[in-house]
Structures are given as C-alpha cells and as structure tokens.
Image (cartoon, rainbow, N blue to C red):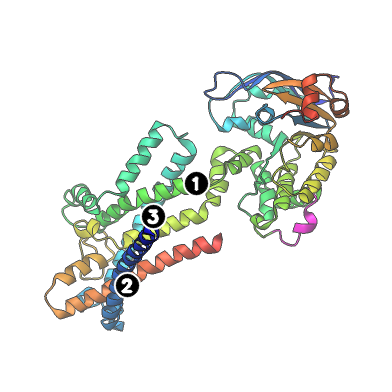
C-alpha cells in the first residue's frame, strides 16, 4: 500500500507538549493518500488534533514542544521533505502554503470578504492585481460561496453567517493551491444545513487536494472519508479503508468505539 | 419578617448612596455649566489669556496633549504588543505589567517632579517639551494596559489561522491581530487622551504657563488647566469668571472625547 500514491507520510512519530513528561503521541505511522480523504477519529484526548496540528507544524506557535520521528511531504516537485526538520521561517511559510488548515471555529480575518482571500495570496508574495483578482474569484467559486458573495466582496467578512464564514476560510486556503488541506472538526460549530454544505464541498475538493479531517462525528467520517485512522490515548490503533474500519474492524477497541460502547 | 426588613433597609441605603453620589456629580455639572456659560463670550475663544481669553491656552493644551500622544501611542502600543504577543507571559512580562500598573497609579505630581529634574532644571527653565514628556509618561502605561488587554481578547484561533495561511508572526500580529483589536485600542487611546488633556499637576512646573500665544516648545507653554488653577486663585472677579468659562470648556472637551470613545465602541461592534 505504501507506494508513491502518498502525499504525506507520518513515520515513527512522537509528540510531546511543552512541560509534559510523557509524549501525547506515540509511535504513529500513517500514510496520507493523494487526492483521498483521510479521517482521524477517536475519543477526546486521543491525540487526533495534536497529530493534525503537527502536519503543518502549527504547534510551533507555542514554544517548547518536542517532535520526534518523521513527517514527510511528497510535494508537487516530488521532493521528499521531512517537515520536522524545518527551522527557517521561509520554509515554514512554504510548508503552510502547501499544507493548509481549516479550524473548528470559523476564523475570518477582520477584513472584507475579498481581502480575506487575497490576504493569503499577498502573503505568498503575489503582487499582480489581476492575478489576485482571478484567483480570489476562482477560490470563492471552488468553495461554493461565489454566488452569495460576488455582490458584496467589499463588505466585512464578519457579517457572514457561520457556515459562510467557514466556506470563506476554505476558499482562503484553496486559493493558495495547497497539496493538502487539514480540517480540524470543521463542522462542529455549525448547524446541520451548513454542515451538509461543507461536507459536500470537502468531497468535491479531493479532486484537487488531499484531505485530512479530524471529526468527532462518526457518521461524518463514514460518509466522507476514503481512509480512517482510529486513535486512542496517543496511539494509532487501526488504520484502513473506511468501509473496512466501520464494517469489519480488526481490533476490538475500534469496534467498541465505532459501535458506541465508549468514547 | 426580619429578612424582609433587612432587605428594605439595604435597598434604601444603597438608593440613598446612589442619589448622594450622583447628586454631587449633577451639582458640579450644573454649577459648572451655569457659571461657565454665563461667562462664555465669543471673545473668550478669540483672545489670548493676556487679553482675557483662552485661545492660546486651548491651542497650547491640545498641542501638548497631541504631541504627548505621538510619543506615547507608538511606545505604549509596541510595549503592549510585546507583552501579549512576544513575551510568552514569562517573568519579565509579569514584572513589566506590574511596573506599568504602578506607573498608572503614580501620583501625577510625582511625574511632574521627575520631569522637572530631568528636563527643566538642566535646561534652565520651564519649557513645552517637558510638559509633553510628562504627559506622555502618564499616557504610556494606560496605552500599554489597553493594548495588552484588547489583544488578549483576540481569539487564539485567529493567530493560528494567520500562521496556517503562511504568514510570518510579525505580519499576522500587525495585519490581523492588531486589526481585530483596533476598536478597543482606539477607544483606549481616546480615553487616555481625555485623561491627560485634563491634567494639571504634571504641567505645573514643567511647561508652566504662558499668557501669550506661542508655538515655541522651548519656552513656557500656554496651558488651559494650569491657567484655571492660576485664575481661580486670583482675587479679581474677571479672573474667576474666566476660570469658570475655561473649566466649562475643558469639561465639555473631555466629555466629548469620552462620548466619541463610546460611540466608536458601539458602532464598530
């Protein structure tokens, strides 16, 4: 299975939070397949968000955390890079442009709708106005929010509904043409209708990007994902095709969780 | 029965206290408005102090407060940004926060004395710059603390989202985080401006006062508040009347700035 169909690969990965005596993630091995959706599931505190947040090293916002092992990014130039070795700011910026992230709570910037999407492009060093304009429109279309926003691009993004804000955040990430998008429980702060729209959007996105999604909602994982990883107390218990994990898990613990016996 | 009685007694006491407190405030405002407006003429605004007006005093007071803001706003904001965004809330940050709080409650006359020793004595006399520095010293801790507090209200997710989009730390702080806290910080700056524009003690023996119109900051500088203090101590009726008029104008200015601060907070939310 571990062929070059992978876009990222987590190998023998340990993660320890600053000041913690024991690692929060232990010996994680996980492939992230290209143009597929991989779901991370598990009860609260199992480390699924910690793992996700390692994959773009957003943990580094807070000092003192310790990474061990490897997380490789097979980016479009087929260069193999262990992202845990990144030290220079420029390389961090490159990593985060290749591996985007969408958070639980929508996080629009205090700017206009247009500026929200254009901001990331400007951070990426794009200066040409017409290029920015084109890519903003394309991103808003890709995130299925163009129709609702095209007449109010200059208005503040804070005036959008929660679901719209979340799609705007997805547009913002998509505009950078990332290889991977990390979703950290992207619908848990949204109503069912907005959730449906986001899920549809994620399913469509996989034509262009590879997706890793952390979710508490097991229906969401089974509806959406191609592969599922079940985590428990910092260990990766089982990984496989979603159908197999949900219908015929090999580990008893996975079955207990999926059938709702705990968690 | 006892419980109800106690309830009533406390209700009455607290109502009474509120009435007394607000009563004094109203009394002050009414007296001030009455005596102030009575003594306010068009010439009050067109004449300088030497001719019985406050034109030079208003210009002087605003000049010093504005110049002080130009010093204090960047220093205070950058220090606030350091405390909230860069210090990792370590020991140094705790010391700095405490120091800033102490400075905020330092008696303003002490700041005046300090600046006197620093900028008046060695330079051979009262001067406008000394007044500006004294006001800036008063303003800095207020702006540090507002910036610090307002930045702490910006959700952490916003910083993470900025980073996740490939922003460097300083860009995200300046272009996203500070922007998100803009309304609160602006209000804080306005309120601190309202605070210093009504200060007397830090100016009393730094910039002192000037009867004539001047923009030369190396001289004694005209001040509305110091003039009120001086005029009120003079025995003649005309001086007292001008003091009332000047007090009224000062109060109106401070009130206006405060209202502006509130308006910004409300409209931008």
Camera-side residue: A233 or B81?
A: A233
Q: State the CA–CA distance, disc 2 to disc 3.
A: 34 Å
Chain letter for mark 2: B
Residue B103: percent from left, percent from top: 30, 46
How dense is the environment of label 1, judged by Cα within 10 Å: few (below 14), some, or many (20 and up)?
Answer: many
Quadrant of image for the N terminus of chain A: top right
Camera-side residue: B92 or B49?
A: B92
Q: Are marks 1 and 2 in contact (CB under 8 Å)?
A: no
Residue behind mark 3: B70
Reply yes or no: does residue A171 show up in magenta: no
Q: Is mark 1 on a helix, strand or loop?
A: helix
Q: Is B147 drawn above or below residue A16 in the view shown?
A: below
Q: Is B127 drawn above or below residue B19 in the view shown?
A: above
Camera-side residue: A96 or B88?
A: B88
Q: Which of marks 2 and 3 is nearer the N terminus?
A: 2
Residue B217: percent from left, percent from top: 27, 59
Q: Which of marks 1 and 2 is nearer the N terminus?
A: 2
Chain letter for mark 3: B
Which label sits in the foreground, 2 or 3? Answer: 2
Quadrant of image for the C terminus of chain A: top right
Q: State the CA–CA distance, disc 1 to disc 2.
A: 36 Å
How dense is the environment of label 3, judged by Cα within 10 Å: few (below 14), some, or many (20 and up)?
Answer: few
Q: Is mark 3 on a helix, strand or loop?
A: helix
Q: Which of marks 1 and 3 is nearer the N terminus?
A: 3
Q: Are the residues flagged by discs 2 and 3 from a single subunit?
A: yes
Main SS of residues in magenta: loop
State which region is magenta: A143-153
- Residue B89 makes an appearance in the image: yes
Which mark is drawn over residue B26? 2
Residue A106: percent from left, percent from top: 67, 46
Residue behind mark 1: B151
Q: State the CA–CA distance, disc 1 to disc 3.
A: 21 Å
């Amino acid at each position: 299975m571990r062929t070059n169909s992978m876009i990222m690969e987590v190998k023998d990965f340990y993660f320890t939070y600053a000041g913690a005596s024991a690692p929060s993630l232990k010996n994680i091995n996980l492939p992230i397949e290209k143009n597929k959706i991989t779901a991370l599931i598990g009860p609260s505190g199992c480390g699924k968000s910690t793992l996700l947040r390692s994959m773009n090293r957003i943990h580094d916002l807070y000092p003192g955390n310790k990474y061990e092992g490897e997380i490789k990014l097979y980016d479009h130039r087929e260069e193999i890079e262990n992202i845990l070795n990144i030290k220079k700011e420029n390389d961090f910026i490159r990593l985060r442009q290749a591996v985007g992230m969408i958070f639980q709570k929508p996080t629009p910037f205090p700017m206009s709708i247009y500026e929200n999407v254009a901001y990331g492009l400007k951070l990426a060093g794009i200066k040409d106005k017409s290029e920015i304009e084109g890519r903003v429109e394309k991103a808003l279309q890709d995130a299925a929010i163009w129709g609702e926003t095209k007449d109010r691009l200059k208005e503040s993004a804070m005036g959008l509904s929660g679901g719209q804000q979340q799609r705007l955040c997805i547009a913002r990430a998509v505009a950078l043409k990332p290889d991977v998008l990390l979703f950290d429980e992207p619908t848990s702060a949204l109503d069912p209708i907005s959730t449906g729209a986001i899920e549809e959007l994620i399913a469509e996105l996989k034509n262009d990007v590879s997706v890793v999604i952390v979710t508490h909602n097991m229906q969401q994982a089974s509806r959406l994902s191609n592969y599922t990883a079940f985590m428990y107390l910092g260990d990766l218990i089982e990984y496989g095709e979603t159908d197999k994990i949900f219908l015929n898990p090999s580990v008893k613990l996975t079955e207990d969780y999926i059938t709702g016996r705990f968690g | 029965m006892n419980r109800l009685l106690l309830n009533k007694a406390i209700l009455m006491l607290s109502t009474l206290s509120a009435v007394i407190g607000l009563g004094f405030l109203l009394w002050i405002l009414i007296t001030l408005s009455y005596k102030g407006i009575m003594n306010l003429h068009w010439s009050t605004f067109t004449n300088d102090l030497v001719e019985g007006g406050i034109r030079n005093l208003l210009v002087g007071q605003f000049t010093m407060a504005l110049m002080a803001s130009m010093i204090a706003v960047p220093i205070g904001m950058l220090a606030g940004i350091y405390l909230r965004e860069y210090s990792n809330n370590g020991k140094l940050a705790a010391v700095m926060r405490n120091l800033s709080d102490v400075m905020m409650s330092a008696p303003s006359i002490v700041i005046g004395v300090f600046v006197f020793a620093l900028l008046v004595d060695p330079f051979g006399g009262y001067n406008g710059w000394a007044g500006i520095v004294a006001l800036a010293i008063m303003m800095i801790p207020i702006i540090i603390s507002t910036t610090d507090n307002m930045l702490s209200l910006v959700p952490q997710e916003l910083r993470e989202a900025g980073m996740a989009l490939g922003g460097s730390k300083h860009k995200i702080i300046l272009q996203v985080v500070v922007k998100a806290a803009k309304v609160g910080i602006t209000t804080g700056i306005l309120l601190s401006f309202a605070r210093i524009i009504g200060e007397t003690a830090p100016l009393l023996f730094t910039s002192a006062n000037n009867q004539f119109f001047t923009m030369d900051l190396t001289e004694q500088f005209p001040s509305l508040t110091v003039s009120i203090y001086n005029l009120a101590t003079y025995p003649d009726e005309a001086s007292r009347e001008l003091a009332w008029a000047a007090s009224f104008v000062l109060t109106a200015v401070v009130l206006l700035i405060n209202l502006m601060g509130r308006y910004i907070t409300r409209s931008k939310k």
